[in-house]
Amino acid sequence: PRPHEEPADLQQHHRRREAAGGVERAHAPPMPNPPDRGQATRPDWRRRAGSWFTRAVETKTCLVTGANSGVGLVSARELARQGWSVVMVCRDRARGEEALASVKAAASGPAPELLLADFASLEDVRRLAATVSGRRIDVLMNNAGLMLTERGTTREGFETTFGVNHLAPFLLTNLLLDGLRANAPSRIVNVSS
């Protein structure tokens, strides 16, 4: 459609409504200053409606594990930039505080928070879950992981890669699952490489 016209799916919706019950609708005036044909592919009213919607909803909270580098850090930074409340989970305090400063600099909403947990210990995972269990969490992003070239074991005796990459996120998800369900529609994002 042209920038000042309704999309085809919306036109079909209005035709069906009118056919079903004879409902009349008011036609919106054409948009002022429509872009040239070769410019924008997305009508301006969609951009305005989208930004209004994101401002109108309450602040969402995302818990990001492995948030001190890579995908976790970028995700935490971008969510904070969009106004989300971000809870960053890192293993190392120094690296976590460095990442926290980076995310704070980008934040446009609530200040991000840093929690420490070593996923090589299921006891640390239980402590983390107990710390955040009373909070509203809309998205749990299981991003923490590692790749080792030599075999090692966790504190509980599991092979380290299996313990950190599989058992720890599984346990954390299950410990937080009731709270995530209570905050529906919530999401669980599992990152793997």
Image (tube, helix red, strand yellow):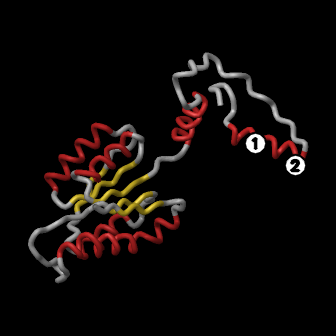
Q: Do the residues labelled 2 and 1 touch (CB within 8 Å)?
A: no
Looking at the image, which residue sits at the far front?
38
- Give the secondary structure at mark 1: helix
Q: In this view, does 166 lie to the left or right of 1?
A: left
Residue 61 screen position, x and y as percent: 42, 53
Residue lying farthest to the right in this orientation: 22
The single residue placed furthest to the left in the displayed view is 150
Going from N to C along the chain, the mark reached first, 2 or 1, is 1
Badge 1 amino acid:
Gln
> Residue 20 — which label?
2
Quadrant of the frame with the C terminus: bottom left
Kind of residue at badge 2: Ala
Left or right, 151 with reference to 31: left
Please provide percent x and percent y for residue 77.
31, 44
Q: Where is residue 30 in the image (x, y as percent from the top left)?
A: 70, 22
Does dot 2 land on a helix, a strand or a loop? helix
Q: Dot 2, crowdedness within 10 Å: few (<14), some or many (≥20)? A: few
* Mark 2 or mark 1, whichever is nearer to me: 1
Between residues 147 and 178, which one lies in front from this camera angle? 147
Report which residue position mark 1 lands on.
Answer: 12
- Residue at the image point whose x is 66% and y is 22% from the top: 31
Residue under the point 30% across and 51% down: 113
